[in-house]
Every structure is written in structure tokens, then in C-alpha cells.
Amino acid sequence: MAGFSEFHDELRSVARDLLGKDRALDWAALVEAGWVGLEVPEEFGGAGATFEETAIICEEMGRAASATSYLGSAVLAVGALNALQPSDVRDQLLRDIASGSARVAVAFEPLEFVPDAEDADRVLVITDGGLAEPAVTVTPRLVVDETRRLATVSPTERDGDVLCFAGDSAAIIARLRDRAAVAIACDSLGLSEAMLSATVDYAKVRQQFGRPIGSFQAVKHACADMLVSISVSRRLVAAAVRAVAVDDPDAGVATAMAKSRACAAAVDIAGKAMQLHGGIGYTWESGVHVYLKRAALNRSLFGSPTVHRQRLAQRYR
């Protein structure tokens, strides 16, 4: 277990360093880093890793507010393809993703706000039985977060051949939705930590009345509240990541708790960071607005806090 933890620490460190140098890594850089094929089986050119490793990259991309197409092709598409029955088409798609020769987007019903569909080479649509690849029209959607590209996918013909899921379709689709929601929760956790770090650093150097503002009790309490909120989110997100990685039957519960808590908290934390930065926090140059907008979009993607809390409430009815 210690060695496994060390591997995660190293992966996190490398990702943080690379994204710190360039948060808008292109597709070739993601492929070269080995992140695109993390969960692709080794026999198809991937690393044969699990969702736990992918979650680390998602978190670091949130920390950097990274503008990449990692979510659509490396997270959602690979997860969906791994849930299919083995076939020549599926295997080749996995090889193409791992090698970087193809970017694949996956659309859930309804086919709106599909991540990274605009630049995808192939767009797969989740149906009741598996994945289909109909001819589609992709229309970019304008969203508040400029670091993400979302689009509406409109089929222009009837679904063709369907690659079938390896098991109960309804259960697999539910797991894929949980996987997507947890990936977004990881992103929100990362951006929350980035906002706390930036705020603490600013409070140490910004002076008012001849003293660093970090010495004022109100600022201390605000930062402490942010830390407590992040600590709660981290525990819930870690539990959800593990549940998704091992295909826990109760993964839906852990997902709903993590997604609703981490994404709602991220909006509050980014907003508080903007306030604690004072007037500069509201300027375009500060960059705080980038995180606030990303947090706002994350809150809505793959289920709002209200939707996930309603899921939890169903258990007690």
C-alpha cells in the first residue's frame, strides 16, 4: 500500500509541475505524458491503471483550471469503451485513444452540453444497449467557463451498429454517469484548493493599516472556513473515487454526496477568494474569475447539487 501511495504522490507531483508550466496543454502533450491512456488496458497500448489514477489528473486539472480535452476523450470515452463487450471496433478505438491518433467524445442523453465534442474525431452516443456512432452535427455551446468546450450533438441519421455493453445496460449507464460526476467533483476539489492557496499567499503580502491582512481575525476565520470545507469535500471525493474504481454497488450514494458537496463548496470558496483578494480580485488580470466560472459550470455538469441530494433523499422514502 505504501508503494501505491508513493506512486500516486509522484503522479500528482508530475501533473502539478507540468500543468503549472502550461495549463492549456495540447492533445499531443497529454498523450506524451501518458495521461490519455491511463485506463486503457496494457494490451492496447495503455497503462492499465484505474479510475483512482485518472481522478488524480482530474483534480490537478481543476487546480490549474486547465483548458484541455482530457475530460471528454480520456475520462468519459475510455470509461465507456471499457464497459463494452470486447470487439475489434472497441479494441481499435482504445488503441487509437491511447496512441493519440483519435479523440473520441461520448454523449449521454440528452445530447446537450457534451464535453469536447467540437474537436473530437469521433462522437459516440450512449444508447439503451451500448454505444452507437451515428452521423451527427456538432454545435458549440457558449458557457460561462471559457476553459471548457461543450457542444450539442444532433444525430442526422438513425443509429447504426451498436457496440453492446458487457452486462446490464441500465446499471452500466448509471455507473458511467457516476464516473462523470465524480470526475467533475475531483476537478472542483482541485480548484478549491488552488483558491485557498492563492488567498493565503495574497493575505501574507497584502498590507492594510501597516499589517498583512492575514493577521486580521476576520481573514483568518474566512481562510479557516475554506480549509474546513475543503477537508470535508476531500473525504467525500476520496470515498466516491474508491467506490467508482472498485465498482462498489453503493457507488451512487458516495457519488451523490461527493458531487453535491464538493461542487457547491467550490463555488462558495471561489467567491470567498474573490472577496478576500479585495478590489484586485474582481479584475480580469487577477484570474480568480476563471476559477469562479469553472466552479459554476462544474456545479451544473452531470447533475446539480439539488439533483444529487434528491438521489440521496430517495433512500429514506
Image: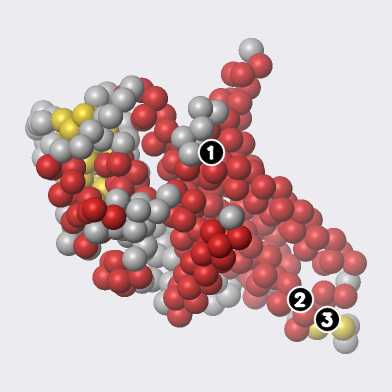
Image coordinates for residue 21, horizontal then vertical, percent: 45, 80
Observer-nearest residue: 102 or 302?
A: 102
Please, what is the three-letter code of the amino acid marked with disc 1? Ala
Colour scheme: secondary structure
Identity of the residue drawn at 43% across and 50% down: 50
Identity of the residue drawn at 87% across and 83% down: 211
For the residue labelled by badge 3, is the local secondary structure a helix, a strand or a loop? Answer: strand
Sequence-wise first label, 2 or 1 = 2
Q: Residues within 10 Å of mark 1 (few under 14, many from 20)?
A: many
Mark linked to residue 243: 1
Circles 2, 3 touching at the beta carbon (< 8 Å): yes
Query: Which residue, given by chain and number where applicable, does mark 3 sit on?
Result: 212
Q: Quadrant of the C terminus?
A: top right
Image coordinates for residue 57, horizontal then vertical, percent: 46, 60
Mark 1 vs mark 3: give the one in front.
Answer: 1
Q: Quadrant of the N terminus?
A: bottom right
